[in-house]
Image (cartoon, grey):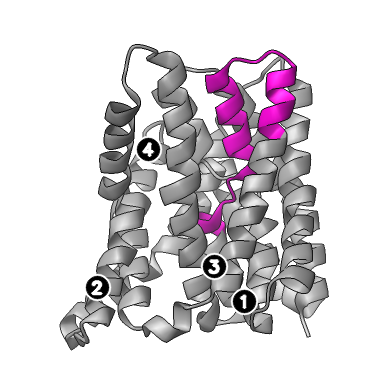
Amino acid sequence: MSLILEAVLPLFALILAGYVAGRRRILGAAATDSLNTFVVWMALPALLFQAMALISWSEIRQPGFIAASALAMAAVFGASFLADRREGRRLADASLSSLAAAYGNAGYMGIPLCIMVLGEASLPAVIIITLLTACILFAFSIVLIELDLKRGASLGGTLRKVGISVLRNPLVCSPLAGLVVSGVGITLPAPVLQFTNLLGAAASPCALVTIGLFLSQGSTTGHRHTVWRIVSLKLLAHPLLAFVLVTWVFEMPPMWAAAAVLLAALPVGTGPFMVAKLYDREAAVTSEATLLSTVLSVFTVSLLVGWIAP
């Protein structure tokens, strides 16, 4: 119970602070976009770059963790996608809701949660999940959306466009740059390390407040059954699948197994909402799924943390 009070509740308190600030318009209408831009382009990249630059390749050589996490994501995405297609939803919309069902809030919530529950050693696990989400899950969903909405475009052209977009993502290129630094044996100079320390320290609190600001802008949708399916898959099916895979299928150290389950239990991230807005699809489904899963995760994540904690 003490770990839940010390690690989980402060995270949700920051989200609540952002929500209240958004509802009362304390930070202004443009605060969400500005703070989100700061987190995505400055604070989180600094944290991810430093984390990967300071570790060795052997520390992240965890094929069991990668396989279990990727399979759990794929299974949840596939289940949601098949259900949407059976209901007659078009390819782009089915891809968006399936992306939401498998897209955990690893960057914004996963980093502070894992560090507080499992320690600094769990940060590489969060980064691997972030890369899996951004480089594979996110990119695959965008390919499906592009193929649906731009039927005249060639598959090769679509893949090239998505590949360039993924590589330009600061949450992808920053940890990859850190891996290069680590791989060639470069030691970060003290001023650089101090810079990334200061900037990276702002990532977690700013990210959590940003979630609250985003949730305060909630909209409504007529597809409530789709929203509940997304939330059920994300908060229940996803961590259960991860638990089965890390317990009985793949071998890995206990900390990595706990991180896999904890990261799978995270609520829906903001990525699907941003993609829906980008392609002018109904964003209310992903927005409501994010809001509902975040609220419910106060209880589900707290229970999970209580079970994981020694």
* Front: mark 3 or 4: 3
Asked whether the residues under the numbered discs 3 and 4 touch, taking CB atoms below 8 Å apart as contact, a structural biologist would say no
Find numbered disc 1 in the image and state the secondary structure of the residue it sits on. Answer: helix
Locate residue 248, reporting x and y percent. Answer: 79, 71
**Residue linked to disc 4:** 33
In this picture, residue 260 sits left or right of residue 21: right
Q: Which residue appears at 50% of the width and 18% of the height?
A: 281
Residue 31 on the magenta segment: no
Q: What's the amino acid at mark 4? A: Asp
**Residue linked to disc 1:** 256
Q: Which residue appears at 37% of the width and 38% of the height?
A: 33
- The residues bearing labels 3 and 4 have C-alpha atoms spaced at a distance of 21 Å
Q: Which residue appears at 56% of the width and 29% of the height?
A: 96
* Front: mark 2 or 4: 2
Q: Quadrant of residue 201?
A: bottom left
Rendered-image quadrant of the N terminus: bottom right
Q: Which residues are magenta?
A: 80-109
Which badge, 1 or 4, is on the more N-terminal residue? 4
- The residues bearing labels 1 and 3 have C-alpha atoms spaced at a distance of 16 Å
Locate residue 265, reporting x and y percent. Answer: 70, 56
Which badge, 3 or 2, is on the more N-terminal residue? 3
Q: Is residue 196 above or below residue 223?
A: below
